[in-house]
Image (cartoon, helix red, strand yellow):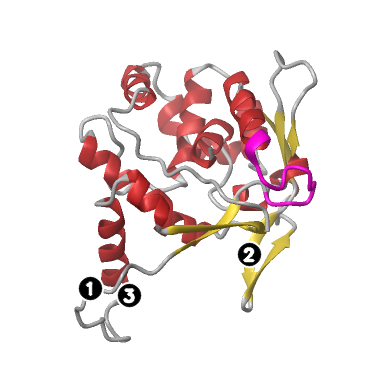
Amino acid sequence: MLVHTAAWTGLRSAEPAGLQIADVELPTNSNKPGALRVDRTVARVGTELRYLTPKTKGSRRRVPMTPATTVLLRDYLREHPCADEPTGPLFPAVRLVPPRPTGKRAETPDADAKARAARQTDALAALSVSEHEKRLVLDWTAPLRHATYSKAVFRPAVLRARRLSPHAAPSPDFTPHGLRHTYASLMIAAGRPTLEISRFMGHSKVTTTLSVYTHLFDTDDHADAMAALAELAAPAAPNVVPLRANCQ
């Protein structure tokens, strides 16, 4: 749900962590699309995560959702353990359960951190979705930490997708921030006004949108982008870990 929401709303990679239940606007008429209110971000201050106000005025915004995203979020909230708490996090904090002991000597503390992280990602990607799910612990009362989500869920899912369907899957270097670029590409391909795109993406100036995505504005041929999107719409096998737990 988080990946879909990010790709179809253009949120910055850290902004979904700041979303709360009350930030989801679902119309009474189920045929009308809803919207997300982006009013805060989450950042680590000392040893804890805190909600902070976005740095720029443009970052605080109301982002409309597609009908499909509205339906999915409505269904998601029906299953959300804390859906009745307006200030509850929309997406839960996640952490990894340590793997079972293998009998092998543990790495020394001074081992290269990047190498350790890469090996952990590869190990998680080699698991099936159900095996990966068992390694995850969700806390629906705490906000999502973007860095942990990226390492524990997103990156392994990308690598797993490449293993299962190498031709349809995204680049191995694809990051959550890439979903924001996906949104911009789709909006530009749909012919939406630059000012509208800039406002929805939270850019303080239209010139920012034009400079970052100038290569997309300069072409009328979006066939490759749409073909790739169509491939991703029908994955060969599931690779997203379901997020289910109790509100405690």
Query: Which amino acid, mark 2?
Result: Ala
> Which tag, 2 or 3, sits closer to the chain's start?
2
Q: How crowded is the residue under tag 2: few (<14 C-alpha within 10 Å), some, or many (20+)?
A: some
Residue 203 shows which numbered tag? none
Residues 231 and 101: in front is 101
Above or below, 109 relative to 83:
below
- On the rendered structure, is 248 left or right of 222? right
Extent of the magenta region = 78-89
Residue name at image x 33 percent, y 16 percent: 223
Q: Which residue is mark 1?
A: 102
Marks 2 and 3, how far apart at CA: 22 Å
What residue is pinned by disc 3? 113
Query: In the rendered image, which residue does mark 2 sit on?
Result: 43
Q: CA separation, marks 2 and 1?
A: 35 Å
Q: Relative to 122, say whether 176 is above or below.
A: above
Rendered location of residue 102, percent (x, y): 23, 73
Question: Judging from the image, what secondary structure is the residue with disc 1 in?
Answer: loop
Q: Residues within 10 Å of mark 3 (few under 14, many from 20)?
A: few
Residue drawn at point x = 71 percent, y = 48 percent: 82
Which numbered disc flags the more N-terminal residue, 1 or 3? 1
The part of the image, by quadrant, that contains residue 69 is top right
Quadrant for the C terminus, please: bottom right
Residue 43 in the image: above or below residue 56: below
Residue 32: horizontal and vertical position, in percent?
Answer: 72, 16
Residue type pointed to by label 3 = Ala
